[in-house]
Every structure is written in C-alpha cells, then in structure tokens.
Image (cartoon, helix red, strand yellow):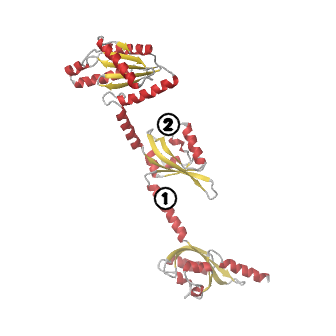
Amino acid sequence: MEDVIYQQLLESAVEQSFNAILITTAQLDSPGPTIVYVNHAMTQMTGYTKEELIGKTPRLLQGEKTDRTMLTCLRQTLEAGKYFEAVTTNYCKDGRAYPVEWNISPVHSATGDITHFVAVQRDLTRAFHDQETIQILSSALELSSDLVIMTDIKGRIEYVNPAFEQHTGHHRDAVMGKTTRILKSGQHTPQFYAHMWDTLTHGRPFSDTFIDRTTDGQILYLEQTITPVKNAQGQIIRYVSVGKDVTERVDREKKLKRIANTDSLTGLPNRMSFDRRLDKEMTRRDRYMRPLSLIMLDIDHFKFINDTYGHHVGDNVLVEFARLLSSNLREMDLCARWGGEEFMVLAPETTRDQALQLADKLRQLIADTPFPSVGHMTASFGVVEIGDETAIETVKRIDRALYEAKRLGRNRVVTG
C-alpha cells in the first residue's frame, strides 16, 4: 500500500511540476526514441496535447534553428550513458521557435541497462527576454549622456558609466570602491549633506544641483537625482544617481547676471545692483539699529576732460578712477558707478563722522594721484548717515550735499 501511495505522490509531483518533463524510450537509432510520457507543463510549453506527443519522436519539436552539432553531442553523450545539459531551439505546434534548456538523464534498469531517458526542459523565452532587456538597459546606461553612479548603502561606488568619466575626468577603474566624496568641491555645507542622507535613508529620492570638482580642479555643476534601490523585503540595498552636467548653463546664467548687475566700462556694480544692496542694508540697519552711511562723489570738470582729450581718454579715466576707489575701500564697503562720472559708496557699520573721514581720505588720494593722459584731477563729495527715511529720500539728501560741494568750489566734502 505504501508503495502505491508513494508512486501516486511521485506521479502527482511530476505532473504538477512547473518544468516540462518528457520521458522517452532508449532507442537512439532511426527513427529515434519514442515519447512515452509528457506532463502538463510540456503540453503548455509546446502547444501539443499529450495524445499528439506520445508515440512520437522528440524530433517533432526540432527545426531549422535547432543546433545540429549539439544534437550530435547529445547522441554521443546518451550512448555513453551520461547526463546531458544544453540550450538550443525547439518549435511549438504553431511553428514558433523558443529557446529551451535541456537536462536529460538516462534511466537504468536493475541490471544496469538504459531503458529510458528523462528530459526536464525549461522554456528560456522569458529569461532570454530579461537578459536582452538587461543588455539593452546596460547599453543605454553606457551610451547615455547623463552621468550614472551606482553605490552601496555606504556610498561606495560600484558602477559609473562613460559619461561620468568624460565629465569628471575620473577613470571608472580608479573610483571603484571609493566614496563619492572624491567629487566634493567644498562648496556645500554639512547641513546640505545631512539633509541628503536623511532623505535617502528614509527611502525617498533626493534631487538638487551638486557643485562638484573634476580631476583637474574645475567646478562641475550637476543636476542630480539620487534614488534608493530596495530589495523584495523593502530594505535599501544601494543608491543610483543620475545627473546632468549643467555647468555651461550655470556659467551662462552667472554671466548674464553679472552683465545685468555690473557696469560694463568700470566693472563696478551698476545702479540697479547698488539699489538692491542699499535696500538690504537699510532693512538690516532698521532691525539691528546699526549705523549706515552713504558717500557720493563726482569727478570735477569731467566734461572738460572729454572735450579736450576725447571720450576714449575719458573712459580710461573712469576705469582708473574706479580701480583707485575699489582698492582703497574696506572689504565691507560697496562702491558702484551711479551714472556718468558719479560714484556711490555704501558704508555699513559707519557713522557720519567716520564716513566724513573716509570721504576726505578718498578726496585727498584722488587729488594726489596722476591719471593717464590728463594728470591730476579732483572730485567733490557728499556724505550722509542714513536715518529713518526711505532710500529715495536718502539719495535726494546726499545729492543736495554733493551739489553744495560743487557750489562751494569743488574738491571738498559736504555732509547732508
């Protein structure tokens, strides 16, 4: 009874196996072995019914793409009574070719004779498709213009694509096992990286513009998205970063911003840029009750210089004048070209008396400095300490002080 139950269990297991199973006689000479059993998976894989397969030769499943050299090897191996394993191409009933893995074993009788062959077959269509998909994705990564970095959970690099090598200058063999710290430029704060890791370790993607550095020290701007990769249990097993090099765009934006905020002749901040800084400093003054002063100056008789020597000489004078001012101001001061031959100095943390001293120092320096082509010249100054007033009211007040300096004979400092 136990033998019967065991046989029934065995037959049930074979019948319900996910792998296709085929049993043939051991006759290898023409017309070949005869199929004596197939399970349900075999009929599902081939499209044939059991009745259509039993009594036929397995050659029914072979066709044009079946490897003939492999078939010769199969015959020789089975004749020697050995196990055979190979991958080839079989054909369904409807003529569709499919890749298949063969695992064929001889069955011996009690006397040692080979009586049957058992073939366990596996349709590799999905596996081949998955492999093909992997190859396609791998090729896409290798050909992508975006930088791709794969790291373990500690940030150690496991893979980089050629675009990474091209943009960073790092060879992939040299970065394997190293952390992405090799790219750091030092321009991000510790808080930036703390926020990044907090986001990633909680399983969320992190996107931002990274300021990195190439092997030759150049700054590299990357718009990057780092995504955690999880296993079936939901555990983070690695991180994949995809980044686009936006260095040219950032540099272009910086240049446009610089053009919009800089006087093209002198290189000083222009009036629009100065107005923004003035508003910020006035807000800061109101909040913290700190002193803030303005100095306005105008080159005396500049029209005479242009009329006598030409505008090209006048332009050179303005450039040298701006350089002289900038190099003799404090780091916290802001000097801007206000318009024409007028300049403005914003002096934070500076009282009226301190601003008067600074203005007189500049006035004397200008008077003592010979300028190319024109020799010595002078400038007139207006000085105000900003009070409880608007920026427009402040500018009007300092403009009146400058006008008074001109009226009193020039080359002097007047406070408003």
Q: Residue furthest left?
A: 308
Q: Position of residue 251 (x, y in %)?
A: 39, 40
Under mark 1, the amino acid is: Ser
Looking at the image, can residue 80 be seen?
A: no
Q: Position of residue 52 (x, y in %)?
A: 57, 87
**Rendering quarter of residue 4:** bottom right
What distance separates the C-alpha of mark 2 from that of mark 1? 33 Å
Left or right of 218 in this view: 412: left
237 or 202, which lies in front?
202
Instruction: Name the residue tied to disc 2.
Output: 187
Left or right of 113 in this view: 125: left
230 or 217, which lies in front?
230
166 or 285, which lies in front?
285
**Rendering quarter of residue 57:** bottom right
Callouts 2 and 1 close, C-beta under 8 Å: no
Looking at the image, can residue 177 be seen?
A: yes
- Work out which quarter of the rendered image holds the C terminus and state it: top left
Callout 1: SS:
helix
Instruction: Name the residue tied to disc 1.
Output: 138
Query: Does residue 295 lie above or below 408 as drawn?
Result: below
Badge 1 density bin: few <14, some 14–19, many ≥20, Cα 10 Å: few
Q: Residue furthest top?
A: 408
Residue depicted at x 49% and y 38%? 185
